[in-house]
């Protein structure tokens, strides 16, 4: 039994289990960050932030003043980022659905301002899940009005859409039906139209209510809120445009007030008016992660993450998070493809230097330093120096090469020389020493081949490190590094042929 368990729980089997577990953990953490913190898989994805300012103006009557203003609520369509009131001499209170301002008697025209910052108005559907409201009271009509109402409902059934859309489209016909003209007041307003449609819906037993909101678009002049109608249909409140009967929340549209409560109530003032202004600003979704976490009651989890660190530390960690993927590339190049390089992680160090220097200037500097370094190393080999002094002499020569390349590049007005300063001096000296030893033991062809393979591996690593999307994903979803860890460990259990060996051992297959 024990032997069977040992055969079952091999190192490869255990590592596979750990890999599956790490994938599940990483998948959950990615979902958590996307859902609660608003992370995305696209770097620098923009999020619109809307500043809405409500300007309330009125003339005081000499009595105590009380202002009650309806305000937006957080919903699936948008979230409230911040709120502010500019009203000198007023005491303010912000509740879930209204803003209340109070003051002692004042003189002269009064202006108070309420500002709110909103974001995430992208997935609104204008459909609000809610419990079924009470059945509306049937409106009291005269005999003639009831006959006209029944005739209107009969005419409405000829229109397309549901019951609400049919009524809206009937009342918006051009030219209008004579029955519609007779039922409407002579000087109809959008509110009169909405109220009549609401009464006809109540006559059919369909709950409805008025809704006011504004469109999120920057305008030079102030704007008044638009009036819409909501009706409870099939277990949901649906929003309808009174001009065409279209269902759903219009794009970039914010509902400010619903139901029977008024948009603005003022005690101690007359000639009141309210105007709205909208200002748009843009930020990245990543920068809003802290705010989103706070709104989702996940602030403590965010505060203990790397995303709450100062920007300088975040930039450092961002580079560290990409290294495991670069290491995986090197492991695949060496253990699966079978390319022989100058040292295990020398290609990754060369790639990091190319990031600082730029691809073309860095490659030119690398070639020049390798050619001169091999030439100098060949001269030192004739002196029969010991290993440490010989490598030390090569290091000094590399430093001198960097110095003269910098001077030469400056005189030519090129940055190629200064780019050489970013190459690790000790690593370059060791690469030159390793290439020289390979040259002496295995010949020039094998030495040059290792150098070329090292550059190829460095270019593959460079392509990954310099990719903004990959670097952002590895930083934002750093749980993926745990997955990479077990993939690398599983590669360590691979004992099959490498790709370069398939050609070498092809005669054995025959």
Image (cartoon, grey):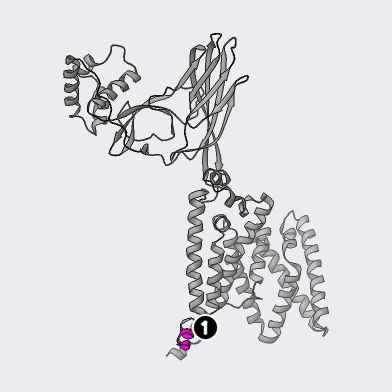
At 68% from the left edge and 63% from the top edge, which residue is drawn? Answer: 353
Query: Quarter holding the C terminus?
Result: bottom left
Q: Can the viewer see residue 337 in this picture?
A: no
222 to 80, vertically: above or below: above
| Left or right of 407 on screen, residue 466 | left
**Label 1 residue SS:** loop
Q: Which residues are magenta?
A: 1-7
At 52% from the left edge and 26% from the top edge, which residue is drawn? Answer: 99
Magenta stretch contains residue 2: yes
Q: Residues within 10 Å of mark 1 (few under 14, many from 20)?
A: few
Q: Position of residue 249 (x, y in %)?
A: 38, 35
Q: Main secondary structure of the magenta part?
A: helix
Q: Can the viewer see residue 405 in this picture?
A: yes
Q: Position of residue 426 (x, y in %)?
A: 76, 70
| Left or right of 218 on screen, residue 182 | left
At 73% from the left edge and 62% from the top edge, which residue is drawn? Answer: 420
Q: Which residue is mark 1?
A: 495
Q: Position of residue 331 (x, y in %)?
A: 57, 73
Judging depth in this view, the residue of 316 and 406 nearest the camera is 316
90 to 44, vertically: above or below: above
Judging depth in this view, the residue of 29 and 173 nearest the camera is 29
Magenta stretch contains residue 232: no
401 to 170, vertically: above or below: below
478 to 135, vertically: above or below: below
Q: Position of residue 3 (x, y in %)?
A: 47, 88
């Amino acid at each position: 039994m024990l032997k069977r368990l040992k055969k079952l729980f091999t190192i490869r089997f255990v590592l596979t289990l750990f890999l599956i577990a790490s994938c599940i953990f990483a998948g959950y953490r990615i979902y958590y960050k996307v859902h609660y913190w608003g992370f995305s898989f696209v770097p620098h994805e923009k999020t619109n932030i809307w500043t809405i300012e409500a300007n309330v103006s009125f003339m005081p009557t000499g009595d105590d003043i009380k202002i009650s203003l309806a305000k937006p609520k957080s919903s699936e369509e948008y979230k409230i980022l911040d709120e502010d009131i500019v009203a000198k001499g007023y005491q303010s209170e912000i509740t879930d659905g209204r803003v209340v301002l109070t003051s002692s008697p004042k003189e002269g025209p009064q202006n108070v301002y309420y500002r709110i910052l909103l974001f995430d108005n992208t997935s609104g559907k204008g459909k609000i899940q809610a419990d079924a409201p009470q059945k509306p009271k049937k409106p009291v009509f005269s005999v003639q009005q009831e006959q006209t109402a029944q005739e209107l409902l009969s005419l409405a059934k000829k229109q397309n859409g549901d019951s609400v859309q049919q009524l809206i489209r009937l009342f918006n016909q051009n030219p209008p039906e004579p029955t519609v003209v007779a039922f409407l007041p002579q000087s109809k307003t959008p509110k009169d139209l909405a109220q009549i449609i609401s009464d006809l819906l109540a006559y059919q037993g369909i709950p409805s209510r008025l809704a006011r909101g504004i469109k999120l678009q920057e305008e030079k002049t102030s704007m008044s809120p638009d009036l819409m109608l909501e009706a409870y249909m099939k277990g949901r409140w649906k929003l309808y445009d009174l001009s065409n009967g279209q269902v759903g929340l219009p794009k970039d549209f914010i509902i400010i007030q619903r139901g029977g409560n008024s948009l603005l109530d003022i005690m101690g003032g007359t000639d009141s008016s309210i105007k709205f202004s909208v200002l748009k600003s843009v930020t990245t979704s990543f920068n809003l992660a802290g705010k989103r976490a706070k709104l989702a009651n996940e602030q403590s989890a965010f505060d203990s993450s790397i995303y709450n660190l100062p920007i300088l530390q975040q930039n450092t960690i961002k580079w560290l998070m990409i290294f495991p993927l670069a290491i995986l590339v090197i492991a695949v190049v060496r253990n699966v493809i079978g390319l022989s390089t100058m040292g295990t992680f020398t290609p990754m160090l060369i790639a990091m230097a190319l990031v600082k220097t730029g691809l073309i200037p860095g490659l030119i500097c690398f070639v020049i330093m390798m050619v001169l370094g091999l030439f100098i190393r060949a001269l030192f080999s004739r002196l029969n120096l010991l290993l440490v002094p010989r490598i030390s002499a090569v290091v000094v020569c590399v430093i001198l090469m960097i110095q003269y390349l910098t001077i030469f590049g400056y005189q030519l007005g090129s940055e190629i020389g200064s780019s050489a300063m970013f190459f690790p001096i000790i690593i370059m000296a060791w690469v030159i020493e390793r290439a020289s030893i390979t040259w002496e033991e295995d010949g020039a062809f094998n030495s040059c081949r290792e150098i070329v393979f090292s550059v190829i591996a460095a270019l593959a690593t460079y392509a990954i490190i310099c990719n903004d999307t990959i670097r952002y994903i590895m930083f934002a979803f750093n749980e993926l590094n745990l997955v990479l860890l077990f993939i690398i460990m599983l590669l360590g259990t691979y004992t099959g042929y490498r790709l370069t060996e398939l050609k070498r051992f092809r005669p054995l297959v025959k």
